[in-house]
Amino acid sequence: MPWLYFDITSPLITFVPYTLNMYRTHTCGELRLADVGREVTLSGWVQRNRDLGGMTFVDLRDRYGITQLSFNLEARPEMTEQARKLGREFVLQVSGTVTERESKNLNMPTGEIEIRVTRMQVLNASETPPFTIEELSDGGDELRMKYRYLDLRRPNMQRQLMLRHQTAQAVREYLNSNAFLEIETPFLIRSTPEGARDFVVPSRMQAGQFYALPQSPQTFKQLLMVSGYDRYYQIVRCFRDEDLRSDRQPEFTQIDCEMAFVEREDVLATFEGLLRHIFKQVKGIELPEFLRLSYDEAMEKYGSDKPDLRFGMEIHNVTALTRNGAFPVFEQAETVQGICVPGAAEWSRKQLDTWTDWVKRPQIGAQGMVWLKVAEDGSLKSSVDKFYSESELKTWAEALSAQPNSLILLLSGVRHKVQKQLGALRLAIADELGMRSADSFCPLWVLDFPMFEFDEEQGRWFAMHHPFTSPYGADYEEVKKNPGAVRANAYDLVLNGSEIAGGSIRIHSREIQETVFALLGLSAEEAEKQFGFLLNAFRYGAPPHGGIAFGFDRLCSILAGLDSIRDVIAFPKNNAGRDLMIDAPAEIDAQQWKELNLKSTL
Ligand code: ASP
């Protein structure tokens, strides 16, 4: 059935029974054959208008659906004349009798009835909208963002925002029933050096000083644990002034959570429960088992720390099998690894060249690609036939468990680069072959992340998660001595190739926190200045604690089966960080510059 009309019986839409008022007795989505004969009043927008001579039909739309109105020229000439002239998006109120339709439309829930209109009032006229307000609009992105309030009238946008609402309700339901408290934390805080760039807000009253908008409520939620609130959550806006990659929003929403007196397993169990509850409530789906992979395993098998497990095509290391002294490229490489694409032995030379060019693009950065076809009859053919014997090639096919009619693709080079390149290739091929179905869901936890990453350019260590994450099974002596080897007590929840949540067990000892700050290049004075409040709080009985935050926009987009988070945000920014509707950011006037003690660059 086309997604053209709402099905108000769907669990996605909480149907609020109408309240009888002067504008409507029913919504445009609810009348059925059983209502035939009723006198009703509806209000809504004109979706379209068809004049068939003696009869005129108008589709009236609201967020619950569409109901057909009929006007009979003979019975009511004046009103029918008026109905003929109604433009798209006029706002109407009509009263009439629910009647069985002669030609029924079983594709829409109200398709068996129509309203024979006896009274009509135009509540407001509308100019012709700049694009069609239908599921598949004819308007381009920019135009639809400029007129977002019209775009939001489209049935799919309305369904998406209703789904977002329902997801938020499911989150609250679950967390409330698990003793979590919803507590707000401030939006005007101080700027801190770690993490992404802050958005800053000049203070009028303290000349020359700035607030920052929070990148997350991280330190506040930890302080709430120190204060004894034991289980906290918030569906909260976070702000990061990053260069906008596609589908990043400068402001986005997290389901932010923290718990005291817990270990990693408690957090994993609690939030596995949350995701299960959401899927059950919103999609009626029972999620499969949550797999677990260590960071190293995820990188080795899938070339990504957020692997998509909806399909196989795992990465295999065949370095040892390629060492026969003949093929210099493989001889010189640290590693040779590959994936096996099922059903692809028939790929043409041209297709293989296209994929080779694809991996050689600077974004991927491979030097070249070797292929090996395993035909339906098991015979082998490869791009390196002259360097390897048939029996050698066979060992590769075995190592990759290649079935008849499959294609092995191999890349070589430095280990961590080859893994990432194959990880990207694996996803792109799966996309091409339609192996990433929007209605299958494979959740997993990725664990045992490295605690620190060394940045060659800046010559210092960075926290891979954030500086408040505790080391896993290492004391602070080890953190000091060998930071590169220390694992973090951090976890990511991954769904279909997206990191939907991430968190950690936190440091709650002042000494370890100071050690980590020092390792991250923060002097004792700097640490005191930036994070003195937290270090001080740790002096007064901080309980062991840990938490997690879900990317709420991404979660909603996955639930809606959409790629873009913009489609589940009511008023998003474009790729340049602009709100095209209100035209922000915008200049401020000279008086504001002055009051804020800023020097105007105007
Ligand atoms: N505050 C972290 C983040 O925004 C999540 C967490 O550790 O709870 O990524």
Image: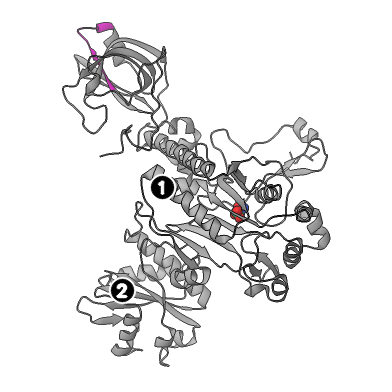
Looking at the image, can residue 370 be seen?
yes
Image location of residue 150, percent across then percent down: 44, 30
Quarter holding the N terminus?
top left
Q: How is the image coloured?
A: one colour
The residue tagged with tag 1: helix, strand or loop?
helix
The disc labelled 2 sits on which kind of residue? Leu
Q: 223 or 479, which is in the foreground?
A: 223
**Residue 279 numbered mark, or none:** 1
| 132 to the left or right of 376 | right
- The residue that appears at 48% across and 81% down in the rendered structure is 335
Q: Secondary structure at mark 2?
A: strand
Q: Where in the image, quadrant-wise, is ligand 1 located? A: bottom right
Indicate the position of residue 100 as horizontal and vertical percent values: 19, 20
Q: Residue at x 27, y 75 (%)?
A: 403
Report the span colored magenta. 68-78
Give the mark nearest the N terminus, 2 or 1.
1
Q: Nearer the viewer, residue 130 or 472?
A: 472
